[in-house]
Every structure is written in structure tokens, then in C-alpha cells.
Amino acid sequence: MNKRNSQDKNKHYSVNKTIKVDSGSGRLMTGITSAFLLYMLVIYPLALHDHYFDITYTKYTVFKVGMILFAVIWAMGLVIVLTGINAGGMKGRHAGGNVKVGTMDKLKAVICDGVYGTDICMVLFFISGVMSFIMAEDKKNAFTGAQGRYCGLAFMILIFIMYIIVSARVSNMEKMWSLISMVFVLVSSVTFIIAILQNIGFDPFKLLDGINRKQRNIYVSTFGNIDIFGSFICIALPLFMGLYVTEKSNIKRIVYGIGVFAGFMAFIPANADVVFAGVGATVIAVLFATVYMERVDRLFELVMLGSGGYLGMVLLRMLVGTNGAKITGFNRLAEHPALLVIIFAVVLFIRLIIQVYINRNKTEIYINENKSEVYINKQKNGTGIKLIIALAVVLISGIAVIIYGRKNNLAMFDFNDKWGSYRGYIWRRVTGLYGELPFVQKIFGHGNESIRSLMDDRFYDEMLQVTGTVYDNAHNEYLQYLVTQGLLGMLSYVGVVGTAVITGVKKIKKSPYILGLLLAVISYGVQAIFNVNQCITTPYMFLMTAMLIGMCRRATEE
């Protein structure tokens, strides 16, 4: 009898280790999370109040209110699940049937019972934000971030809660994400089209009314500043590119393709080199991913869509006019439409060759029973060698560009105060300011959103004389966090991005949605080297990271 009781105890322990949320509870939590994702991906991108005049505060308010409501509703849903109030209660499932589930088992089933490196880095990043607030002299500004881009401690609290909730392990998120991503394509395309119309002289919603004509070139779409709009492109476009690569449905792939085409058309209205940096990194990542997945044909289709979209915008400007909209930086490529036509023709030719090769050497694509692996070729056909060749192509291309730039004295290869629209100036000054901070502030930072006060105290007159403006941001997210949240903040932020990318790469075959989210994180992480953290698009970085980790949790569970 005692032996049987011992065996029963062991059996109960094994069951608890394999608990899964029953359908009712799973749908409840998934529905709440899905509603928030729709809010962030449908309502938030289009939210405006007084045109561009209060866009930063408006976006922050919309994010803050939505996030607080989401957190409250999610907490209520969690209470319902834990107390078993929902219809039918909550049951555990295992090979032997239904079992009674304890409170901790329910909590683990709804959230997670494992910790990823990104989780740890996110906690450290939040702690650095709290410590930065403690270090700050101006506590009010450190909390609200009103002197900067509203990225104070209050913002840190919101994104931390968002990460915890969205990255939670909820059931059937993949099915909802398929629908949500399609809607996001449509909404993003609307923002792209608004920018395109503004660039050729049409402003259907009168967003530029009241803006000085000389400043109209720096405001675009529903995001305001061109760099911020460029940051949004670096989130949305890579996501669509990844979904295009892994999607099996031709209809859905067409929708993602439309998003890619419109996104590349928006390059010119954005007129921001950060777009080329982020999306350029995405193209490189897609190269390796498609080689690894034996889907190089999709890579060339994306290049065709991208070059076709960019060329289409060039031709549209030639036919309709530009209404004085200028192009600078890498967008000067638009001044050479013949070169773009040649690029498109070459890519099309290569794609046709690949198709002929595929038809002659059909590879087997399969999905296993639990749909955990997609687009895997049973015969690897020298994948390792192909990856090495891809790496060599990237390195040689990079070296060639650098040599060409240095030899021809291109401005982007001459780092000085004027480099990158005076990014050279602000980076040098901010780096010097960090070196002068006390040791404790080197570790924990001078205070949330404190760049403005530091620059005003030391370089106010010089800023106006050299650049003609006053800086409230380092224009490099990593440098920004280094000064405002210290070494702990900067390293933990790098850790969030880096560990998320590593986790996504490891799980890339486990779900068709992981690649798109992975590319979005990579793209944002690269453009962050040249851009500002702010309350408009920075939430998307943490949202995509949370979704990526959440998808990886589900992949591990299955």
C-alpha cells in the first residue's frame, strides 16, 4: 500500500511538469493579449491629435493609456484563471487524462516556467532605469521624461510590464498573430501611402498645415519626424519580409509582398539613412536565413519587390513631380533611375535562373506532425558551404564599399562634427560627458532623459553656433543609455537585443512567425546606432522582442 502511494506521488509530480492551459482559460488570456496587439498595431500608428504640433505627447498618451488598461484587464483575467471562475474551470492535460491543477501550476501554464537570457537582461534594464531615477537631480523630469522624448521612469515601467505580459506563454497565439499581422500590413501600408502622397505634393489629411515650408521636408506620415518614420519602417518592413519568406499561403504572401513593395516606396519620403542601415542589415540576415532554409528563391523575390517599389517611387516622382521635396544621403540613388532598372533586370534574370534550377532539382519541403519545423530540405545540398559563400559575399561587398568610399572621399566615410547631420558632434560631446561623470553615475547613469540638461550646462552656446539646434538626445540609443542609465543600462539593453536575436536564431525553424519578429529586432537594433529612443516607435522594439520570446516559449513547450 505504501509502495502504491509512493508511485501515485511520483505520477502526480510528473503530471504537474506537463500541464497545459485548457481551452477556456487559454482563449481568455490570448484574447486579451490579442486585443492589445491590435491596439498597438492598428490604432496606435494612426493616432494623431493636433497634426504634428503635439505628436510626441499624443503618441505617448495613447501608448500610456492603452498599456495601463491592458495591464489592468490582463491582471483581472489572470485572477479569473487562477481562481477558476471561468466556465468549466481550468484543467490540466496529460497522457492519462484530466487532473486537478494547483494555483502555481496555473500560473506557470499562463506565464512560463522557464527563464530566457532576454528575461534577465530586461529585468536588469528595468533596474538600471530605477537606479538612474535615483541618481537624477531633477526627479520630476526623470520620471516623466518631459524634457526629452518621454522616456523617463514611467515609460520604463510601462515597457517592462508590456514585455512581461506579451512574452507570457499563452495558447494559440500563433493563430491570432496570423490574422493580426495581416491587419498590420494594411495599416502600415496606409502610413506608407500617406508619406508617398505627401512626397509628391498631396496632403490628403492636411497634416502639414501650419508647418513652415522650410521644415516640411522633415515631417511625414503619422509619425512626424522623418527619422522616427524611418524607425517605424525598420520595424514593419523587416517583419513583412520575414513573413513573406516563411508563408505557405499564396494569398497571404501576396499581402505581405504588398507591404514590402509599399515599404520600399516609402524609403524616399522617409529620406533617412537610418532606413538603409536597418533594412540593409535585414537583407543580409534574410540572405543567411533563406540559404539556411533552402529558400533563396524568396530572397530574390524580396529583392525584386524592394527594387521594384523603390523604382516605382522614383518614376512616380518623375511623372507627378515632387512639390519641392528634397532627397539626401543614400536616397540620391533615386537620381539614377537607369541604374535601378538595371538592378531590377539583373535580379529578375537571376530569379528566373533559380526557378529553372528548382524545377530541375525539386527539393522536398515538409512540415512535421506538430508543425514545429517548416521549409526544411531533407537533403541539405551543402547548406554549410552555401552559408560560407554568403558570408564571403557580404564581407567582400562591405570591404569594396569602404574602399570605394574612402578612395572617392565620400562624406559618410569622413568622420567629423558634421558627419551624419552633426551626429559626429553630439557623439563626441556625449562621450566626453560620460567620461566626466562620477564613478557611481558611470555605472547607474546621470538620470533618465538628462542629456538636455548636461548639454545645456556645458555646450549650449557651442551647440547653437555649430549646429544651430539644441540637443536633448545622443542620436545613438546605446550612447543615450550609457549616459542616462550608465554602463548597467547600456549593457543590459545590448543584452536584450543580443539574447533575443540568439534565441530567435536557435528557434527559427520552430515557427513560421519567428523569422519576421527576429528580423524586426535586428533591424531596429542596427538603426538604433544612428537614431533616437523615443515614445513613438521605441515601444515597438520591446513589443516585437516580447512577441519573439513569447513565440519561442510556445515553440519550446510544443
Image (cartoon, rainbow, N blue to C red):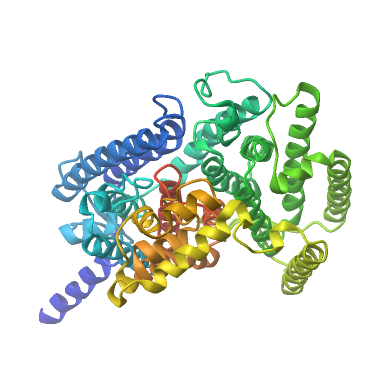
Horizontal side, residue 342 vs residue 414: left or right: right
Place of residue 204 in the rendered image (x, y in percent of width and height, measured from the top left): 57, 18
Place of residue 261 in the rendered image (x, y in percent of width and height, measured from the top left): 69, 37
**Residue 80 appears in which quarter of the rendering?**
top left
Horizontal side, residue 360 vs residue 411: left or right: right
Residue nearest the observer in this picture, 308 or 278: 278
Residue at screen point 13% across, 48% down: 83
Q: How many marks?
A: 0
Is the C terminus in the top left, top right, bottom left or bottom right quadrant? Answer: bottom left
Residue at screen point 40% across, 54% down: 546
Residue at screen point 15% across, 42% down: 85
Q: Is residue 102 visible?
A: no
| Extreme residue in the left direction | 2
Residue nearest the observer in this picture, 523 or 527: 527
Place of residue 541 in the rendered image (x, y in percent of width and height, measured from the top left): 45, 51
Residue nearest the observer in this picture, 431 or 383: 431
Is the N terminus in the top left, top right, bottom left or bottom right quadrant? Answer: bottom left
